Amino acid sequence: NREYHQHECCGCQKEIVMTSLPSKPFSCVNLQQLKELIHQSLSPDLLLPVFQAAWSADNPTSGFCSVASEAAWFVLGGSEKGWNAYTARDHNNVVHWWLQHTSGLVFDPTEEQYTSQNLRPPHQTSAKAKACGFMGVRKAPGNCWGFDRKPSLRAQKLLDKMEKTLKLRESHVLTRTL
């Protein structure tokens, strides 16, 4: 049995075929399933020290925006596939990270840290959002992701956890063009 879905970004038909993260990024990914996979793979050890003390199970995505966005950036294919990192300050003057495609589509893997508190995420409220790059992303010509960058140590740890979660769950998250 084959499963198909209409991709939310480009509208093309996709066959669900993967049970693991790709060795190279695919052109299309089911963004909701990617977000769920990221959420299932987050753990306090991935937080920067400044966010560890404030982390709470009541708001489990709080503080993970940079590492979650960076991991998603690699899975989605990075700038070469039209995905760019953006930042803006939130209502507490804390920098929030998300991804935005050149088509205008926003992918915020941790927006629930705001919406669960009845707040709007900065990508909906800030006029000062700006494109930026991930500080830990280093040049690595010919790496396994298919473009000349490699993840920061924290993002790689999250990607490893995502891969482990997929293997345990045997879920079909990533897709490829038919």
Image: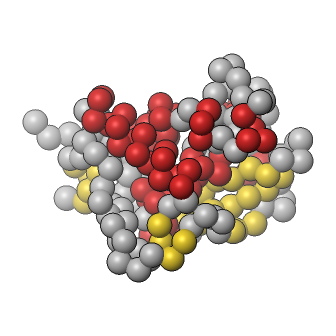
Is residue 103 shown to the viewer in this render?
no
Which one is in front, 114 or 162?
A: 162
Whole-percent x, y for residue 75 in the image:
42, 56
Which one is in front, 32 or 65?
A: 65
Image quarter where the N terminus lies is top left
Whether residue 171 sits left or right of residue 62 in the image: it is: left
Whether residue 8 sits left or right of residue 99 in the image: it is: left
Q: In which quarter of the view is residue 170 placed? A: top left
Residue shown at 73% from the left, 58% from the top? 87
Image quarter where the C terminus lies is bottom left
In the displayed structure, would residue 176 be above or below residue 115? below
Whole-percent x, y for residue 27 in the image:
35, 63
Total number of numbered labels?
Answer: 0
In the displayed structure, would residue 163 be above or below residue 43? below
Residue shown at 48% from the left, 47% from the top? 157
Extreme residue in the bottom direction: 141
Q: In which quarter of the view is residue 114 placed? A: top right
Residue shown at 51% from the left, 76% from the top? 139
Which one is in front, 144 or 108?
A: 144
Is residue 133 shown to the viewer in this render?
yes
Colour basis: secondary structure
Whole-percent x, y for residue 101 in the image:
55, 63
